[in-house]
Image (cartoon, helix red, strand yellow):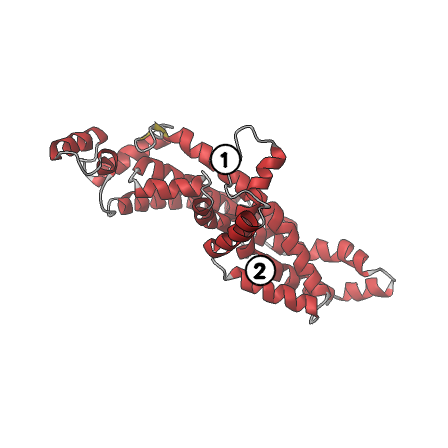
Amino acid sequence: MLTFLLRRLALIGAMLLILSALVFTLVQLLPGDLATTILGSQATPEQYAALRSQLGLDQPVWIRYFTWLLDFLRGDWGHSASLDQPVRDVVLSRFGNTLKLAAVALVILIPTSIAAGIAAAMNEGGPIDKLISVGGATLTVIPEFVSGIILMIVFSVGLKWFPINAMAPADAGFIETIHHLILPALPVVFVSFGYIAKMARSGTLEVLEAPYIRTATFKGLSRGQIVVRHVLRNALPPTISLSLLQASFIMGGLVVVEQLFTYPGLGKLLLDASTSHDVQTLEAAVLVAGIVVMVMTLLSDLTLAILDPRVRIGGGAR
């Protein structure tokens, strides 16, 4: 386990280094630059040249990258020229907002999808099974921006059950904050619901076919007792592992959702920084998002190994 963990941490470090270099290089291919974004189109060539020199944009790409990397590793994330704020403050603040939205999505997603998968398995071949299986598969293929627009039109504009703005006021309490976050959380819940429900259904069916379940039935245990004592204990480990893995994929969906609901999270910051050529902010935001995705993937593997003794880790999860 320790060898596996050390190898994965080393791999995560290497992947983050490659990711940062790729992002830094690809941003240079976008039309325009930060100086043009700041000064607009009416400045003189001399003003552009002076600002580019001040920002270090006249240096070769590789020099700029390694200068940024060394400063970042020392804890100096730089200053966001487009937002006129320290990059660390901006990124961590937006990341905190994204964590709130992701937490609401996971609190909705995990219990409902697992319960739906178990219900489908307990009613295999019946209407409930078909409804959950077909409905989950359908929700999975609907893009976040489509379901988000539909939810916004129906529940915000039409029924007015939820606010159209995902960001609650600064003085809002816990309940009001959650109320603002429920609607933007649902599109990413829809996309992941089918995967987790299907895994929970498959795991439950596998357990229900085991000989000890027949023994429990002969002993007079009710269906509810069988689910609590046997199904949950044996069917949930791979489902929980998949749920943690889906949590990393939620980061990608939040980019669309945050833009749609004008929510100041990390996803929206990534999009805004890329369009304004704010390389320092973009790099820091990408690395934070990358760390979250890779750590959640690692936790998924470790959780499966801990919860399921049948899984053995040696150079990788099997």
Name the element at disc 2.
Answer: helix
In the image, taking residue 136 as reference, residue 94 lies left or right, namely: left
Q: Callout 2: few (<14), some (14-19), or many (20+) C-alpha neighbours within 10 Å?
A: many
Give the total of numbered labels.
Answer: 2
The residue tagged 2 is 194
For the residue pair 305 and 59, the one nearer the viewer reads as 59
Q: Report the residue that reaches farthest toward the front.
A: 158
Please provide percent x and percent y for residue 102: 54, 43
Q: Quadrant of the C terminus?
A: bottom right
Viewer can see residue 314: no
Please provide percent x and percent y for residue 228: 76, 54
User: Residue drawn 66% across and 60% down?
Assistant: 117
Amino acid of disc 1 = Gly
The residue tagged 1 is 96
Q: Report the residue that reaches farthest toward the right.
A: 220
Q: Quadrant of residue 134?
A: bottom right
Amino acid of disc 2 = Gly
Q: Report the residue that reaches farthest toward the bottom.
A: 125
In the image, taking residue 220 as reference, residue 41 lies left or right, namely: left
In the image, taking residue 206 as reference, residue 53 lies left or right, namely: left
User: Residue drawn 41% across and 42% down?
Assistant: 268
112 is higher (above) or lower (below) than 39: below
Real-space CA distance between mark 1 and mark 2, rounded to the nearest whole angstrom: 27 Å
The reply to whether discs 1 and 2 touch (Cβ–Cβ < 8 Å) is no
User: Residue drawn 82% across and 62% down?
Assistant: 216
